[in-house]
């Protein structure tokens, strides 16, 4: 019951009445009486309580400027009425007549109306700013959650064994990247490299990344060939992804015993052998996962003897704009060869060229041993 009583507005009415009485008491010493002040405060509080009881406009939440202005005008009218009531109380206490001139009435009316209207507009602005701040805080919280999820998904940037050495870099264009990479050891000196670009950002993209990352090792345990593996991954995810969401992905299976790498591609730039600058091109459909339910992806196998390196990269690198024009695959190949597969040196060289970082830069380098 106490929660339904507008205690704060009632206190406001009481204090407003006390303020008016104290001002009038300067000219009317008869008002300097504890009973007068107590009666005035009680009248102010009771007046606000009656106003709340019979005014849904005050009780409602102002969701527009018009409604807030109406509330402000109602407050102004209430305040003006309070002033009149207090004036009559003063007249009764002091046994003197009440004189209201046209100028005084007009000025006081304009003052109260102006305060009411401006107060309503300021309230709307304050509420709008508060809503924006809450929305921004929620968005920041979601971004932090997505970023934390993404960082947990990515493996270490350096993995070494007796058969291979893998380095990776992921530099987001925004707070949250749409790219991710992974490597799945399959035993017998075999390693499956994964590089993907998820359409979309934020928590949704992070959940898609988690789904793809969880599915690939399970499917690879049954079928390690990249082409049928992509097909099965596509069948599983198509229909589950939200509308207009898809995953561009490239898989590369390195076999140290055979000295080969087998590549299947679903919408990303072709991997490249660094020393020769030769692209490893898989034929057949190149649609990203999620576009069509049934796709017969194809793979290509290339030699990768010990000592040679191969690089996989997302489209953010060749599409980086230098001087208003895309960097392009061939110019990127020159920079890759010049860097020798050192990703830190490669990214630094691209930044030195002034390449615009409009999209994520992600790359994985495999060195055969």
Image (cartoon, grey):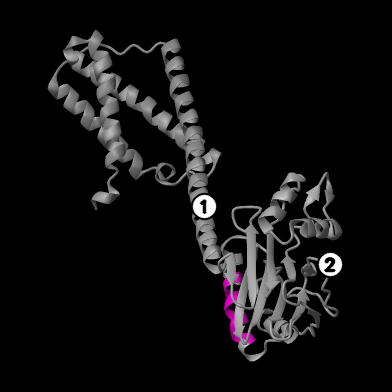
- Disc 1 on helix, strand or loop? helix
Q: CA separation, marks 1 and 2?
A: 45 Å
Front one among 54 and 321:
321
Locate the C terminus and report the quarter of the image it occupies: bottom right
The picture places residue 28, in percent across and down from the top left corner, at: 22, 10
Q: Residues within 10 Å of mark 2 (few under 14, many from 20)?
A: few
Above or below 59: residue 108: above
Quickly name the residue at label 2.
276
- Residue 6: within the magenta? no
Name the residue at 43% across, 47% down: 60
Whether residue 212 can be seen here: no
Residue in the foreground of this view, choosing between 231 and 166: 166
Residue under label 1:
140
Question: Helix, strand or loop at disc 2?
Answer: loop
Q: Residues within 10 Å of mark 1 (few under 14, many from 20)?
A: few
284 sits to left or right of 65: right
Up the image or down, 162 lies above or below 101; here it is below
The picture quadrant where one finds residue 299 is bottom right
């Amino acid at each position: 019951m106490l929660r339904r009583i507008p205690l704060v507005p009632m206190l406001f009415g009481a204090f407003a009445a006390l303020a008016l009485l104290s001002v009038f008491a300067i000219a009317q010493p008869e008002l300097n009486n504890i009973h007068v002040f107590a009666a005035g405060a009680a009248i102010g509080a009771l007046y606000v309580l009656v106003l709340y009881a019979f005014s849904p406009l005050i009780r409602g939440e102002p969701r527009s400027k018009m409604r807030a202005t109406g509330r402000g005008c109602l407050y102004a009218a209430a305040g003006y009425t309070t002033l009149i009531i207090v004036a009559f109380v003063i007249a009764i206490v002091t046994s003197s007549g009440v004189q209201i001139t046209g100028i005084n009435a007009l000025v006081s009316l304009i003052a109260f109306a102006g305060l009411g209207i401006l107060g309503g507009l300021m309230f709307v602005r304050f509420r709008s700013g508060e809503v924006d701040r809450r929305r921004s805080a929620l968005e920041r919280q979601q971004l932090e959650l997505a970023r934390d999820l993404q960082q947990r998904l990515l493996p270490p940037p350096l993995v070494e064994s007796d058969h291979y050495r893998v380095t990776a870099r992921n530099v987001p264009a925004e707070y949250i990247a749409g790219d991710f990479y992974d490597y799945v050891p399959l035993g017998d000196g075999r390693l499956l490299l994964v590089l993907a670009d998820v359409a979309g950002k934020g928590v949704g993209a992070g959940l898609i990344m988690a789904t793809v990352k969880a599915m690939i090792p399970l499917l690879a345990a049954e079928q390690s060939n990249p082409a049928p593996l992509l097909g099965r991954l596509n069948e599983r995810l198509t229909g589950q992804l939200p509308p207009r969401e898809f995953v561009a992905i490239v898989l590369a299976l390195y076999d140290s015993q055979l000295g080969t790498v087998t590549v299947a591609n679903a919408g990303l730039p072709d991997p490249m052998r660094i020393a020769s600058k030769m692209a490893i091109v898989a034929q057949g459909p190149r649609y990203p996962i999620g576009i069509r339910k049934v796709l017969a992806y194809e793979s290509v196998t290339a030699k990768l003897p010990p000592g040679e390196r191969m690089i996989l990269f997302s489209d953010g690198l060749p599409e980086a704009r230098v001087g208003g024009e895309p960097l392009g695959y061939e110019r990127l190949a020159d920079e890759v060869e010049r860097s020798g597969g050192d990703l830190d040196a490669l990214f630094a060289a691209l930044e030195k060229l002034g390449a615009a970082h409009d999209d994520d830069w992600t790359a994985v380098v495999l060195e055969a041993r």
